[in-house]
Image: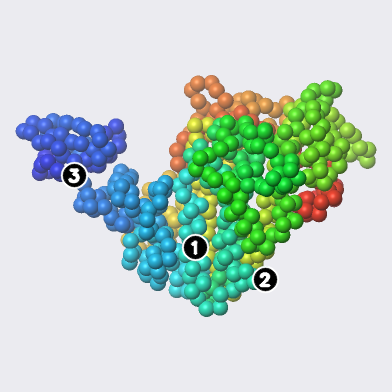
Amino acid sequence: MASSALLWEAGLHVWLLNNKQWLPAVVTGVTASDISFRSEYGETATHPRSQLTMDLVTPMHHTSVEGVEDMASLGDLHEAAILFNIQQRYKKDIIYTYIGSILSAINPYKTIEGVYGADTMQKYIDKQLGELPPHIYAIANEVYVSMWRQAHSQCVLISGESGAGKTESTKFILGYLSAMSQKSTGAAATASGLKVETAILESSPILEAFGNAKTVYNNNSSRFGKFIQLNFAKAGNIQGGRISDYLLEKNRVVSQNPMERNFHIFYALLAGASPDTKERLYLSEPESYHYLNQSGCVNDPTINDANDFSKVTHAFGTMKVGSEQLTDLFSVLSSILLIGNIVFKSAAGAQVTDQSVVEKAARLLSVDTFRLGDTLTQKYMVLRGEEITTPLTVEQACDSRDSMAMSLYANAFRWILERINHRILGKETFKFTGVLDIFGFENFEVNRFEQFNINFANEKLQEYFNKHIFSLEQLEYSKEGIDWADIDWVDNAECLDLIERKLGILDLLNEESRFPKGTDKSLLEKLHSNHKDNPFYVKPKVSNMKFGIRHYAGDVYYNVSGLLTKNRDTFRDDMLKVLKDSKSDFVYDLFDHMRLSDD
């Protein structure tokens, strides 16, 4: 169909097809034979009038030209119109846009004056969604009001790719709900007399220090997911709450991708601890630790580690964590760094090259030095009532060392969450609001075990979204006899089958991890052999150590190097027993919930 019906004139806004993508463009020149265009992204093109069909150029709806606050009202319903609308607003420092009741937030990577604060909060109190310009406070207000209007508990899902601003968005939601709670009557306090709202907000520096890290795309990336439940009384105040964590990236403790860092707390401790504490805990410079120096990045000019340490210790004080417990916690962190510095040599099995490192780690953990060294270099098993000792290879000893470090950190993180939850403990007297902050889809230059797990979690989240937003809603429309058109949506069930079904990627990964002679290469060969014909599996054309998955958000290639090592659970009973026998009550408490296999 020809587009000759268009009244061509300079300044006319159109959609121009270029490399199979629609681009927002404007007519820059009109002659008897040709029309010239310039896209909003700088490309120029000239086409003969005779070739201008509706398949090549279409008029832009006035809503796209002017921009809208709610993209559900866009007249042009395609991806290019959505991106253009967001971009136009972003250029004006307007980072929030609605899609119905969904808020799109674009990270500005800078401070925009007047966007947040008490004055802005005040404007959104008791306002209907859409009554004022899009804002995260509007979403928080809608959640708060809906608990009473609908008499149902509410939930906010915050998702997006790494660096999108999920952590900050979570804090803004919590800040608004806390402010509303404090405005209500009967504001509750914890058992220690600390206001619940204050306790929840004070937990942020602690969780960020122990759960966030610098990645290649984001200097404060959450490396765990969390669900924050706030329990409200009928009077409108927060009565209590609970924080649950998901998928802590504990592998980061022992290895990081190039130019990334370990968890913030390690660098903060080394930068902010007093000289006396550094001496007592054998603390040194970050460059001297294997778990911190292997990625090539120990410092970031945008991160003030010493200042962050001060914030963390202040927050722990607010949460009523005593100085003795704090010293115990920091002792465990130092022991983790020292464990990473234990090096092995091969001499009729793995042997520790420098016993003094083991001695320092053992003192910090209050465990027997010889037992700690032995459990890292030998494997103890009980067979038919008889204890058998098997020497480990150097590679196996390194796996044991890393497994112990990861277990120490994961259990320390668990202890911190328990302390926080104890401080914000309360009861649900009316309804609750949940805030789910889950790390988003990741696709880096090199994607490893961590990205595979994160993207699998996001596939499951997308499946839930598809089921509840599309399938169930459309079924409800049909039951009610509403006249509507089917929405064509991408079902990711086949992608999940590739990962989770029998002989799927997870099954083959676990199977190969159990084989003593299993290698990353043998795993890759099995993956290629079993799934090369699956449309959601991508076998690279060039032979390398990668395989690809066609995720809902795009193709991602995963490097299998180190995949089996990270997936193997080498934290054995004999290692657990050494830590359970610690003379430190703190270390014992960290592992008290874990049971030996023969218990």
Q: Quadrant of the N terminus?
A: top left
- Look at mark 3 in the image and give the residue it sits on: 13
Q: Secondary structure at mark 3?
A: strand
Which label sits in the foreground, 1 or 3? Answer: 1
Disc ID at residue 175 = 1
Residue situated in front as seen by the camera: 592 or 462: 592
The location of residue 198, given as percent across then percent down, is: 57, 65
Q: Residue at x 53, y 56 (%)?
A: 436
Q: Amino acid at mark 2?
A: Ala
Question: In the drawing, does residue 491 fall left or right of residue 99?
Answer: right
Q: Residue at x 78, y 35 (%)?
A: 357
Q: Are marks 2 and 3 in contact (CB under 8 Å)?
A: no
- Sequence-wise, the earlier of marks 1 and 3 is 3
Nearer the observer, 331 or 162: 331
In this figure, which residue is indicated by the disc labeled 2? 191
Q: Position of residue 50 (x, y in %)?
A: 12, 32
How far apart, in angstroms, are the residues tagged by discs 2 and 3? 63 Å
Report helix, strand or loop for mark 2: loop
Q: Position of residue 310 (x, y in %)?
A: 60, 52
Depth-wise, is mark 2 or mark 3 nearer the camera? 2
Q: Give the vertical position of 446 relative to 118 (above or below).
A: above
Secondary element at image label 1 = helix
Taking 367 as reference, is 328 left or right?
left
Residue placed most toward the observer, 453 or 466: 453
Q: Amino acid at mark 3?
A: His
Q: Is residue 499 left or right of residue 21?
A: right
Q: Position of residue 240 (x, y in %)?
A: 60, 68
Q: Horizontal placement of 177 versus 85: left or right?
A: right
